[in-house]
Structure formats: structure tokens, C-alpha cells
Image: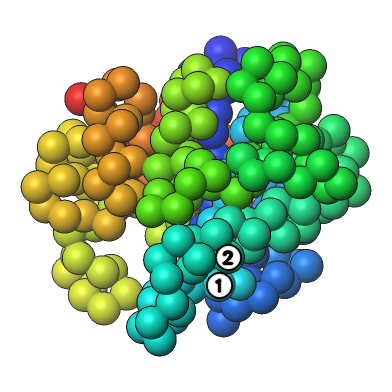
Amino acid sequence: MPDLKYKRILLKLSGESLGGENGYGINTSEVEAIARRIKEIYVLDVEIAVVIGAGNLWRGKQGLDRGMERATADYMGMLGTMMNALALMDALEREGILTRVQSAIEMRSIAEPYIRRRATRHLEKGRVVIFGAGTGNPYFSTDTAAALRAMEIDADVLIKATKVDGVYDSDPKKNKNAVKFDTLTYIDVLNRRLQVMDSTAISLCMENNLPILVLNLWDENALHQAIYGEKVGTLVTN
């Protein structure tokens, strides 16, 4: 069996991925499917950390459009990520995977506080670590939180899980002639305004040379292939 290319990963999931077909709420079947997909690489002794968005529960723009203060809207989103984190933790543990949830905002009754060295130790002991509440600060997205946590735990790659098989020059669902990129540079992503991750996250990865791999998590082979370095999705590097 070939060697693993990536031994420690940060998996970035959108909140919508937990929401089923309509993308809203928490669909237990979808959460369980994600847990099974994670288990497929967990059993290969890959060290896995996860960051989840909250778009299935709260869209800050809805509040902003009604005059809500930005910081309040962002804090509500952070609470949404914790609900998603707990749902995924439960599904993973029912699959027999030891899991820890760490929160950037202190919530002693339900999660550990985020401590970088403790998170790293959990990974070394074979536990999946789910990072909740973003960075703990308003004005920063969960994309940025994923980039930050990936660098803090010294991940080999940041894997952005989507429902398409990579990055295209236009929406492949709307344009049948859309062109898929196998590789991109960070500058390409920024200059073309491609919707890979937000510009702050891309810049953080670029400055620290952290590769980003965009793939379709719902392709039953994609994540497994990625771990072994096979050609899959779109790889963003220098």
C-alpha cells in the first residue's frame, strides 16, 4: 500500500453540508454520512481536525439586511457552528471515533476551550478534533478560522469539502461549458475572484504556504484518493 501524502489534515465543511437537500437545519442522515466518510480515512491513521460553518442555521446577512449589528450577527453564527460541531461529534462517536470539540468562546458545559497544544495532543492520540465558534472574533469567517487552525496545528493540507469536484471558472450547474482547474496558485484565486475561500483565508494560506485542496466530499472515493496524493479536485498552492 502506498504511503499517505497527508498525515494531518484540516477538513473545512460548510454548514449547508449538514442540511440535506435544502441546505437548512441539521439533517441527521447527512451528518451520519459525513461521519462515515471521515471514518474511511480515520482508520488509515490520518490525524483529522474539522471546522464547520453555520450557514444551515444562520445567515448573518439576513440580520444585517434588517439593521442588525455586525458583531451580533457574527456571534450568532459562532453559536450555530457549535450546534453543528456537537451534531458531528455525536455522529462520529456513534461510529466508534473518539472526538473532542473545542470552542473559541468558552462554553465549559459542552466543549473544551480552544488550546492549541491540547488540540495537537488530541490529534496525536488519535482523536478527531472539531473546532467550533470560528476564531472567537466577529468579522472573521469560518474559512479564515479553518486556515488559522490548520496552521496552528501544523496541518499538511486544508481540505475544502464541497458538492462539486473542484474549482471551475464559472458555475458548472449553470454553465455546461465551465472549465475545471486541476491546479491554481493563490494569486490566481485572488485575481480571478474564484469562490474557493474568502480572501483573508487565501492570503493566510499563501503567506504560510499551506496547500488548499477543493474536492467533492460526496464522491465516495475523493477523500481517500486525496490522502494518498492521487489527482483529485483542485489543488491551490504557490
Residue 145: x percent and y percent? 47, 41
- The extreme left residue here reads 191
State the CA–CA distance, disc 2 to disc 1: 7 Å
Viewer-proximal residue among 228 and 30? 30
Picture layout, residue 7 above or below residue 57:
above
Quadrant containing the N terminus in the rendered view: top right
Classify 10 Å Cα crowding around label 2: few (below 14), some (14-19), many (20 and above).
some
Residue 87 picture location, percent across and down = 77, 57
> What residue is shown with label 2?
76
Comes first in the chain, label 2 or label 1: 1
The spot of residue 126 in percent (x, y) is 77, 21
Circle 1 packing at 10 Å, graded few (<14), some (14-19), many (20+), is many
CB-based contact (under 8 Å), mark 2 and mark 1: yes
Amino acid beneath label 1: Trp
Residue type at numbered disc 2: Met
Q: Tell me the quarter of the picture where residue 29 sits.
A: bottom right
At 76% from the left edge and 46% from the top edge, which residue is drawn? 107
Can residue 114 be seen from the camera position used here? yes
Q: Quadrant of the C terminus?
A: top left
The dot on residue 58 is 1
Q: Say which residue appears at 21% left-offset and 75% top-offset.
A: 175
| Residue 47 in sight from this viewpoint | no
Seen in the image, is 208 located left or right of residue 42? Answer: left
